[in-house]
Image (cartoon, grey):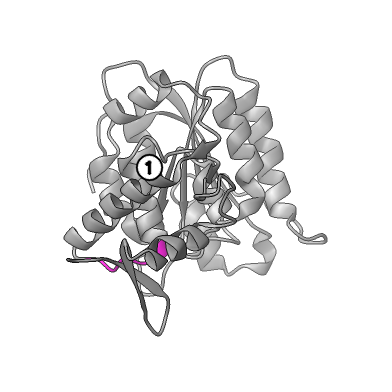
């Protein structure tokens, strides 16, 4: 894969942190190509300053460590004497390396762990932009905290669609997001996202639809919660989707693996 040349506009420093204990390579994938793809995306967006993959490496296979090391990653080994030590180390490093900079930065976090949600909100509050990359099990809190969220198996879409122009525009937008999106606006966002996902010939699973909503609708991107009709807030994205389905505005289909969304016709 050829590297994509950075934009001639102002380049922002890019920091890449990979939680290698949380996000592993999908089965039957080529680790080298996958890592190279993420590095290419990072270089496309600015000047790559930090590239780190965290794990307790003495407990990982040599091949797994080698996949990162040979492509230029620093690989801090974090003992797992306490729970979530890797998360804490990434948060500590990111705060030191990004939050203390005077320039606005781009942070790429490869993880699906909600422990990072607070950090991502801190980064964005200071004017930085955050791209989170995780698997389908990535928590809703993490998805909501990032400027953009993409699933690991959807990197081709990220590389094609997340342009320097789009990211620059997100820097120009106010960093303070509305705390809550109205029910009507959220329903419109949901229906549009379901339609776009289905047009791409992919299944309308909750995670994919949520990612599409954040990708394509500025009203929804970064919002803290969705208001219910009575003015309260939904506890989770699934609760919101079920409420919309109960009104007949979308259709929920239960498969063996998960719930899928479809448009209601008629």
- Identified at 67% across, 68% down, the residue is 59
Q: What range is drawn magenta here?
A: 202-206
- Identified at 77% across, 61% down, the residue is 80
The answer to which of 174 and 183 lies nearer the viewer is: 183
Quarter occupied by the C terminus: bottom left
203 falls in the magenta region: yes
Does residue 231 show up?
yes
The answer to which of 134 and 190 lies nearer the viewer is: 190
- Identified at 22% across, 54% down, the residue is 196
Main SS, magenta region, reads loop
Q: Quadrant of residue 263?
A: bottom left
Secondary structure found at label 1: helix
> Where residue 155 appears, x then y in whole percent?
32, 53
The answer to which of 69 and 259 lies nearer the viewer is: 259
Residue 169 vs 121, above or below: the answer is above
Within-10-Å neighbours for mark 1: few <14, some 14–19, many 20+: few
Image side of residue 12 versus residue 6, left or right: right
Q: Quadrant of residue 224?
A: top right
Image side of residue 244 versus residue 90, left or right: left
> Where residue 244 appears, x then y in whole percent?
40, 60
Residue receiving disc 1: 185
> Where residue 138 appears, x then y in whole percent?
52, 59
154 falls in the magenta region: no
> Where residue 40 appears, x then y in whole percent?
33, 42
Residue 246 vs 51, above or below: the answer is below
- Identified at 38% across, 20% down, the residue is 11
Does residue 110 show up?
no
* Residue at the limit of the structure toward the bottom, as seen here: 256
């Amino acid at each position: 894969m050829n590297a994509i040349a950075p934009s001639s506009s102002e380049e922002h420093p890019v920091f890449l942190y990979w939680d290698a204990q949380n996000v592993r390579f999908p089965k039957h994938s080529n680790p080298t190509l996958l890592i190279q793809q993420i590095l290419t995306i990072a270089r496309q967006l600015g000047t790559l300053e930090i590239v780190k993959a965290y794990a307790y490496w003495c407990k990982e296979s040599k091949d797994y460590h080698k996949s990162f090391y040979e492509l230029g990653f620093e690989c801090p080994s974090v003992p797992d004497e306490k729970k979530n030590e890797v998360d804490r180390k990434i948060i500590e490093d990111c705060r030191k390396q990004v939050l203390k900079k005077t320039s606005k930065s781009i942070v790429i976090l490869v993880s699906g762990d909600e422990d990072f949600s607070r950090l991502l909100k801190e980064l964005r509050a200071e004017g930085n932009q955050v791209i989170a990359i995780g698997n389908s099990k990535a928590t809703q809190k993490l998805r909501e905290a990032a400027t953009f969220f993409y699933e690991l198996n959807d990197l081709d879409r990220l590389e094609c669609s997340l342009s320097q122009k789009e990211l620059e525009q997100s820097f120009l937008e106010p960093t303070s997001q509305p705390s809550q999106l109205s029910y009507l606006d959220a329903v419109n966002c949901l229906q549009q996202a379901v339609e776009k996902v289905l047009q791409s010939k992919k299944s309308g699973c909750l995670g994919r639809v949520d990612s599409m909503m954040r990708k394509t609708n500025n009203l929804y991107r970064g919002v803290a919660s969705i208001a219910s009709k009575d003015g309260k807030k939904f506890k989770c994205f699934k609760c919101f989707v079920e409420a919309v389905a109960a009104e007949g505005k979308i259709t929920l289909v239960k498969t063996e693996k998960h719930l899928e969304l479809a448009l209601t016709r008629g």
